Amino acid sequence: MSEALPSPPALKLPGRPAIPRPAPRAFGGWLLVVAALVLAIVIVGGITRLTESGLSIVEWKPIRGIIPPIGEAQWQAEFDNYKHIPQYEQFNRGMTVEGFKHIYFWEYLHRLIARGIGTVLLAVLAVFWWRRAIPEGYGARAVLIFALGGLQGVVGWWMVSSGLVYRSEVSHIRLAIHLLTALLIYSYLIWTALDLFALARDPSARPAKLTGLPAVAIVILAIQIMLGAFTAGLRAGYAFATWPKMGEEWFPAGGWNAGQSTLHNLVYNPIAVQFVHRWWAWVALVAVVMVARFARQAGNRRAAAAIVVAVVAQILLGIATLLTGVDIPIAVTHQAVATILLGTLIWGGHALGQEPQAA
């Protein structure tokens, strides 16, 4: 009887640790860095939308697009491409190359940060994988986040393409989907980081579960953010610069299009969209404050305080955005704080979803 062949030795790459060395705190910290970059791109995306800069780059060049135009000839070629889309014909006819450079800057910066997010995340995953420092069960999560980032790039171009042929602006529906996808990635990054920090404190800690109240509050806030994207995309924020009434009325006469369905009014009617966005904010206020209350009772006072501060600031900024006629710095801050509010809500929801530690 022949002897059994010996098993081949396990593949050991030079310089790579032979055994896993999980580093949950460090890995979670880097995921928060990526979340901060997502917050940055949301802010720049808001500026891009409010300055009508999003259609200034009419081609999607994921690799070559990292290099901006160099020299007057290349700038003129980019400007000539922009002249072929409806936005130029309807709103910017007569624009100079210098004016074009201003709107190009914001869209270029938006895409540059997007590439930066993907690069940083890929580098973090590669380094922690090489060091065998990704805790068990979290590698798949990180890969999913990276895949969602790739999907977000496709969604971004899908959004931009909606304004290149028949429209003078991007579809507000696609704009909302693009924003919500970014915020899904942002939320998942924060939730995963919080799980990792809990694991660093207690090696037996299990991932937190999203329970009923936080889930409902997140959905309510997501609807409010979606309505905000509709408001921006339809330029509905400019319709009435008064508060709490819209002009002299709570809802302006003739503001509802009786010839269209309720759904059509709520999605496409700028006056109806602004009205719902104004008052759904109070539903969101109640929902997130309830999460703050229960998070406080669960012992996480910092998360509770952060939620309350963020939601009050967000309400005040929303009112200020209206009263200033959509002043761009205030409107952009309004969008930034909405993202921060979502992050605090994720923090509070995570606190409520953690299993109590054994005494």
Image (tube, rainbow, N blue to C red):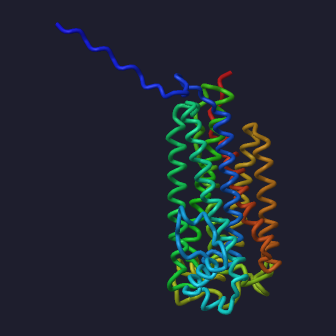
The structure residue drawn at horizontal position 72% and vertical position 61%, both measured from the top left corner, is 338
Question: In which image quadrant can residue 353 be found?
Answer: top right
Is residue 118 shown left or right of residue 13? right
Q: Position of residue 339 (x, y in %)?
A: 70, 58
Give the position of the N terminus as an image quadrant.
Answer: top left
Q: Position of residue 278 (x, y in %)?
A: 72, 72
Is residue 244 shown left or right of residue 356? right
Residue 338 vs residue 223, the one in the foreground = 338
Location of residue 197 with respect to 334 vertically, above or below:
above
Location of residue 273 with respect to 316 vertically, above or below:
below
The structure residue drawn at horizontal position 43% and vertical position 26%, both measured from the top left corner, is 11
The structure residue drawn at horizontal position 64% and vertical position 41%, both measured from the top left corner, is 193
Location of residue 287 with respect to 32 vertically, above or below:
below
**In the rendered picture of this protein, how many numbered marks are placed on residues?**
0
Is residue 343 shown left or right of residue 89? right
The structure residue drawn at horizontal position 53% and vertical position 63%, both measured from the top left corner, is 62
Give the position of the C terminus as an image quadrant.
Answer: top right
Q: Residue furthest left?
A: 1
Residue 41 vs residue 187, the one in the foreground = 41
Q: Residue furthest top?
A: 1
Question: In which image quadrant can residue 271 be found?
Answer: bottom right
Q: Position of residue 329 (x, y in %)?
A: 80, 70
Location of residue 36 with respect to 16 vertically, above or below:
below
Q: Position of residue 330 (x, y in %)?
A: 80, 70
Residue 242 vs residue 297, the one in the foreground = 242
